[in-house]
Image: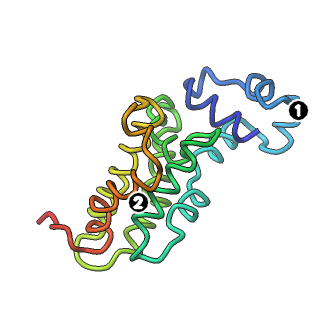
Amino acid sequence: MLAAARRAFARHAYADTTIAAIADDAGVSPALVMKYYGSKERLFTQVFTFDADATALFDAPLDGLARHMVLHLLATQRGQTRDPILRIAFSRHHLELGGQARANFRTQVIDALAARLPGPGAPLRAEMAIGVLLGLGALYATVQADRLTQLDPDEVADLYVPLLQPLLCGEAPTAR
């Protein structure tokens, strides 16, 4: 049900998304969706909660975090589902609740990463690192960049780790 809701909210504005359509996509009854989530707003809130996604994305020691993040993103991209954190890109379609989705993303993903980073400028470096990952994810999910998607995940990680690791370890310059 949650996967169906993620697909629906990624494709349609909140006002145009119905519990019936989500239930149909999930192969369940609308009553079952309502039993588990209570309302469309609560289901939306669940779709745009990033705690579990961030936990999986950041589940590595700092010295190997860049590689882990890239490989994790690629594993979700190459699977049947798209990267869970990329759904933030679709929050702009949801005028009524999109602000809450973006606030959740900031605290549960960006701020959580910043809290792990050593050195000055950690909040900025966390934003930049997540920006690099969102760009990579967008290339896979929407652009479907032919050359990049044909590479082995380890080859992609080899290219992206030098971009990410300095941001994560505090070696990158910081803004004043």
Residue at x 88% of width, y 32% of height: 31
Amino acid carrying label 1: it is Ala
Q: Position of residue 167 (x, y in %)?
A: 28, 66
- Number of dots carrying numbers: 2
Question: Is disc 2 surrounded by few (<14), some (14 to 19) or many (20+) residues within 10 Å?
Answer: many
Q: Which residue is mark 2?
A: 110
Quadrant containing the C terminus is: bottom left
Q: Residue furthest left?
A: 176
Q: CA distance from mark 1 to mark 2?
A: 35 Å
Badge 1 or badge 2: first in the primary sequence: 1
**Residue 29 point in image, percent of width and height:** 88, 29
- Relative horizontal placement of residue 44, taking residue 149 as reference (left or right): right
What SS does tag 1 mark?
Answer: helix
x%, y% of residue 148?
38, 39
State the residue at coordinates (26%, 68%): 166
Label 1, residues with CA under 10 Å away: few <14, some 14-19, many ≥20 = few
Q: Give the label, 1 or 2, closer to the camera.
A: 2
Figure quadrant of residue 43? top right
> Does residue 32 lie above or below 53 as drawn?
above
Above or below — where is 122 with respect to 83?
Answer: below
Q: Where does label 1 land, which residue?
A: 31
